[in-house]
Image (spheres, rainbow, N blue to C red):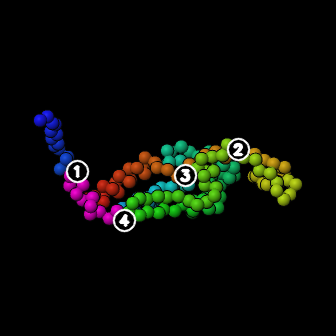
Amino acid sequence: MSGIRVSMAGQFEEYKERLQRLGSIDRAELMAAIAEALRTSTDERFDTETSPDGVAWKRSIRASGGGKTLTDRSHLRTSIHARSSEKGAEIGTNTIYAATHQFGDPGRTIRAKNKRMLAFQIGGKWYHKKQVTIKIPARPFLGLSDADRTEIIELMEEALT
């Protein structure tokens, strides 16, 4: 009879003990902690104006006028919510324009509907146009950063101790 025999030494016993502890951890509590950590990290991106991979967001007209990018009235920022169960953790938003900011928009034409012209103000100056094409650069705010991944691992290791 032919076969193979594998002998494991070193950290095997430690991993075996951890696997046995897996059955006793409170998964719902762990996932709630992960979800909240991700929500907090996402919220901080609005302060740092950076994507999960650390790339600075392109400055908006609002930021050029002394405000902050994606933070005019904080609707998007305050719409970020965390949800969890014992099966997983997630964060997200239900705002209709979130995907436009996350992924960008290469060009969309806006036309006046009820009036002859569109009227809008940029930097204190009023403009009147029949139509405008807007291009919005991607400013990712959702996603996992390296720091998020590290924190998730730390939370999982903490749950196993």
Q: Residues within 10 Å of mark 3 (few under 14, many from 20)?
A: many
Which numbered disc, 3 or 2, marks the residue that appears first in the sequence?
2
Viewer-side label of 3, 2: 2
Q: Is the N terminus in the top left, top right, bottom left or bottom right quadrant?
A: top left
Which numbered disc, 4 or 2, marks the residue that appears first in the sequence?
4
Q: Gap in Å between the C-alphas at discs 4 and 1?
A: 22 Å
Question: Magenta residues: mostly which secondary structure?
Answer: helix
- Start-end of magenta stretch: 15-28
Q: Gap in Å between the C-alphas at discs 3 and 2?
A: 20 Å
- The answer to whether residue 126 of the structure is visible from this angle is no
Left or right: 5 as drawn, with respect to 76:
left
Residue 90 lies, in percent from the top left, at: 47, 58
Q: Gap in Å between the C-alphas at discs 1 and 2?
A: 52 Å
Which three-letter amino acid code belongs to the residue tagged 2? Gly
Residue 35 lies, in percent from the top left, at: 44, 60
Q: Nearer the viewer, residue 89 or 132?
A: 89
Please give the label number shown on residue 141. Answer: 3
Q: Gap in Å between the C-alphas at discs 4 and 2?
A: 43 Å
Left or right: 159 as drawn, with respect to 53:
left
Label 1, on which residue?
Answer: 15
- The answer to whether residue 100 of the structure is visible from this angle is yes
Q: Gap in Å between the C-alphas at discs 3 and 4?
A: 25 Å
Label 2, on which residue?
Answer: 107
Q: Is the C terminus in the top left, top right, bottom left or bottom right quadrant?
A: bottom left
Q: Residue at x 49, y 44 (%)?
A: 53
